[in-house]
Structures are given as structure tokens and as C-alpha cells.
Amino acid sequence: MLSGVRLPAGRGGEGRRLASKKQWMQKRVTLRPGKASDAHKHAIVTACERFIADILKPRFLPDIRPTEWNYVVDIHGAWHAGRYRFMQRYRSGMAHCLGAEFDTPFARIDYMGPDNFNIHWMRHTGQWWPVYRGKTLAEALHILQTDPVLLPFRRLSEYQYDEFQAIDRPLSERTAGRCAIFPHAPASPAPVLPTPMNGAT
């Protein structure tokens, strides 16, 4: 037993008081998709597969570029429970798992009813986040090829943001409209372009 030493008082009481305080927290509600008929499902999958083959692959995966890390070898999609996910397939070039492949989703459309879709994007945390709702299939596919947040990951280093100047509305307006629908949706990050060195043109 220690003598002449005073130990600090425990903080159990303070911790219990903090834990007992009630706080309001905002909760994001994810709407369940509707049940699509076989005909609707076939039409949606066919349109999405054509979109991947004709738009996404030529623009974001014109060829496969092996590296010593993980690199993209395919862009594809899959239908499950009323949702169509757009994914990139990666292959590992690292020695300890050479040739191993895995899928990483980057966007998703949810079937909410006949020609009515909500759009989600995959955050870096692995969490789906809603960004648009009430869009037709044609509108959803147009958004998927124009909103930089929803594009495949390779855009960060290889995609030319100059192409976005041709979008119908400025990026700031599209971001404001999206956040008005979903107040917790993150704003689209402004592209960071390299600064030319002194004397460079």
C-alpha cells in the first residue's frame, strides 16, 4: 500500500454526466428502390451496358496500363435488388499479390419507379451517398458522364477538366442544386490544376 501519495480522483462521474446528455443528430434516410419488372430490368441493364461500352470505356479506359501497383483493367456494372452499380475492376501489380483482381464501385442508380431513378456516388469511406433523385434513365446516364464526382477514379490524374466547359450548367450551379435536394451531399471539389513553372507557357 502506498503512503503519502495522493492519486488523482477518477472521472467516472463526469463521464456518466456527459453520456447522459441527449443531443439531436441528423439522420440520412436512404430510400428503398422499387421492384422492377423483368422488362424494365432488361431495358435498364441493356442501356447501362451500352453506356459503359460506348461512353465510359472509350473515354476512361481506352487501353490497359499495367503498373507496379493496382491498375484498372475493366469498367463494368451489375444489377442487384433494384440497383445498378457501376464498377471498376482493378488488377494488382504488386509482388505479394500479383494478378489478384477486385471490383470498386464508383456510382449507382436506384430504380424508384417507371423511368424514375436516384443517383448515388461512392465516397472514399466506402459509403454510398445520395446526390440526385427523380431523374429519368436518360437524364441519369447524362449526369453520370458529366458530373465529375460520379466519373471513374482515373479522372483524378488523366481526365481533362476542360471538357466540362461544354456542360449545360456551370459546376457551381449543379452543386448548389444538388445540395438543395440533399442538404448533406458534399459539394463537388474544384479541380486542382498544376501551376506552370516560371517561364513555362
Image (cartoon, helix red, strand yellow):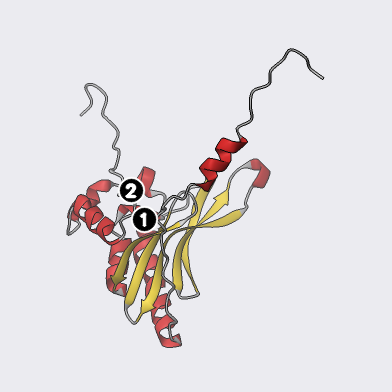
Q: Is residue 148 above or below residue 139?
A: above
The residue that disc 2 covers is: 159
SS at mark 1 in the image = loop
SS at mark 2 in the image = loop
Q: Position of residue 154 (x, y in %)?
A: 41, 49
Q: Is the N terminus in the top left, top right, bottom left or bottom right quadrant?
A: top right
Is there CB contact under 8 Å for labels 1 and 2? yes
Q: Amino acid at mark 1?
A: Leu
Q: Is the C terminus in the top left, top right, bottom left or bottom right quadrant?
A: top left
Residue that appears at 39% across and 68% down? 109
Q: Amino acid at mark 2?
A: Tyr
Q: CA distance from mark 1 to mark 2?
A: 9 Å
Q: Is residue 134 left or right of residue 89?
A: left
Name the outermost residue toward the right. Answer: 1
Instruction: Please give the label number shown on residue 129.
Output: none
Q: Is residue 91 above or below residue 197?
A: below
Is residue 29 or residue 10 the one in the foreground? 10
Q: Position of residue 181 (x, y in %)?
A: 28, 62
Residue that appears at 63% across and 26% down? 9
Q: Is residue 144 left or right of residue 101?
A: left
Q: Is residue 93 left or right of residue 39?
A: right
Is residue 156 or residue 72 the one in the foreground? 156
Regarding residue 55, the answer to whether it shows in the image is: yes
Q: Is residue 133 left or right of residue 18?
A: left
Instruction: Please give the label number shown on residue 151.
Output: 1
Query: Which mark is nearer the camera, 1 or 2?
Result: 1
Q: Residues within 10 Å of mark 2 (few under 14, many from 20)?
A: some
Q: Residues within 10 Å of mark 1 (few under 14, many from 20)?
A: many
